Amino acid sequence: MAEIRLEHITKRFGAVVAVDDVNLEVHDQEFVVFLGPSGCGKTTTLRAIAGLEQPDEGDIFIDGQCVNMLSPADRDIAFVFQFYALYPHLTVYDNIAFPLKAVKASSSDIQERVKEVAAILQIQAMLDRKPSHLSGGEMQRVALGRAMVRRPKAFLMDEPMSNLDAKLRVDMRTELKRLQHRLGATTIFVTHDQVEAMSMADRIVIMHQGSLQQIGTPQEVYNQPQTVFVAQFMGSPSMNLIDGKIQSQADVNPTSIDAGDLALHLTHTEVSVKLSAEQISRLGRSDEIIFGVRPEHIVVSKEPMEHGFQASVHLVEALGSVNIIDIFLGEAPETGDLVLLRARTHPSFRPEIGQPVWFDLDPKQVHLFDRHTEQVIS
Ligand code: ATP
């Protein structure tokens, strides 16, 4: 299998910078997911690796060899952009055998390889069927088989499950991940579905407007988002992000100010969050802050809490296994925008709308971002 390295890849379409100076190393046998909203450059990056798009700048290496000048066919990579793209008039066997016939492999070789792939994908019983007699999930497996049969160095998959219904997507997710593990196949998988990314990836590459925002394991990108974009993109409901200001008017100087004296006042609210010495030491000169906390790290109670804040309930969403409580913290006078904090609670916690509640935050789970750079502070 293969190692894939991108060095300073940039691709423009007229004035649009689709991929902006991307550097990335995908390790041998790794399952990497490109994740980001529509138009962030995922497909263009994938197409550049496949050789279907020529970058304006930068180099692409596969197993240490620069492939910039190699045609897609010579890169020895399988591009699975649509699991449904099967030849309807051919049987499953012939669909899978197609790439081998195209390179004039011997018939005994073809037979052996198709049988091997069919066994891995557990589709031996349907080799004589035409695609119209297969379910969506079976068609996906056949298309994957057609990509696997060439034994490519790596698989590139562009939203391969986007046509499937929700239940099948979940099943295919598990199946694909298991298969990738079994084959030890270096795989890059493109999606805009964060659950798909979290459940399958060894590492997730989060893209926004052509640039890489963060690369890390699912846990890293979820628990330690490096930018406001990543913080709000990962998680559902997404992280609460509220503008705030450091309360001391003095220049922030961690050596001369008592840590206990600094707090973060959340704009248009009466909430001030005391900062830890460590948080203060990282502030530098930032005083306009975006405060972040995930809904699951907020504790809400109908009873007063010693260190909690009092607020009122704006909305209750009962989702079955959990409740989402929107807590009203304040309102921007100029725009009338509400400042709300969404908390995830046990389903048995069902306060009335307008009822006073108390909430507290786990200080270790608070994220601070510089409002101007939108980069993490702590
Ligand atoms: P999606 O999830 O919608 O497929 P994406 O993250 O894969 O989006 P790309 O398809 O890589 O994004 O597109 C990145 C940007 O480049 C977009 O602004 C898109 O409009 C633009 N773009 C992509 N291909 C072309 C093209 N052939 N000509 C002009 N602009 C293009």
Image (cartoon, grey):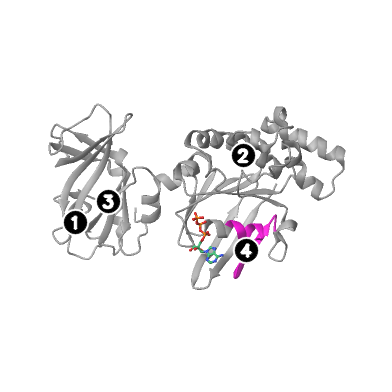
Residue 140 numbered tag? 2
Sequence-first disc among 1 and 2 = 2
- Of labels 3 and 4, the one closer to you: 4
Indicate which label's residue lies in the foreground, 2 or 3. Answer: 2
The quarter of the picture where residue 185 lies is top right
Spatial separation of the CA atoms under disc 1 and disc 3 = 22 Å
Query: Which one is earlier in the sequence, the residue at label 2 or at label 3?
Result: 2
Q: Is residue 328 above or below residue 44?
A: above
Q: State how far apart marks 4 and 1 are (Cα).
A: 46 Å
Residue at the spot x=47%, y=36% of the render? 166
Mark 2 touching mark 3, by CB under 8 A? Answer: no
Asked whether mark 4 and ligand 1 are closer than 8 Å, the reply comes as yes
| Sequence-wise first label, 4 or 2 | 4
Question: Which label lies toward us, 4 or 1?
Answer: 4
Q: Residue at x 62, y 63 (%)?
A: 53
User: Magenta region: which residues?
Assistant: 46-64
What residue did someone put label 4 on? Answer: 53
Quick check: 192 left or right of 341? right
Q: Amino acid at mark 2?
A: Gln
285, 117: nearer the viewer: 117
> Dot 3: what SS?
helix
- Give the CA separation, mark 4 to mark 2: 25 Å
Front residue of 138/87: it is: 87
How far apart marks 2 and 3 lie (CA) works out to 53 Å
Identity of the amino acid at label 4?
A: Glu
Q: Determine which residue is flagged by label 3.
A: 277
The reply, left or right, for residue 147 in relation to residue 240 is: right
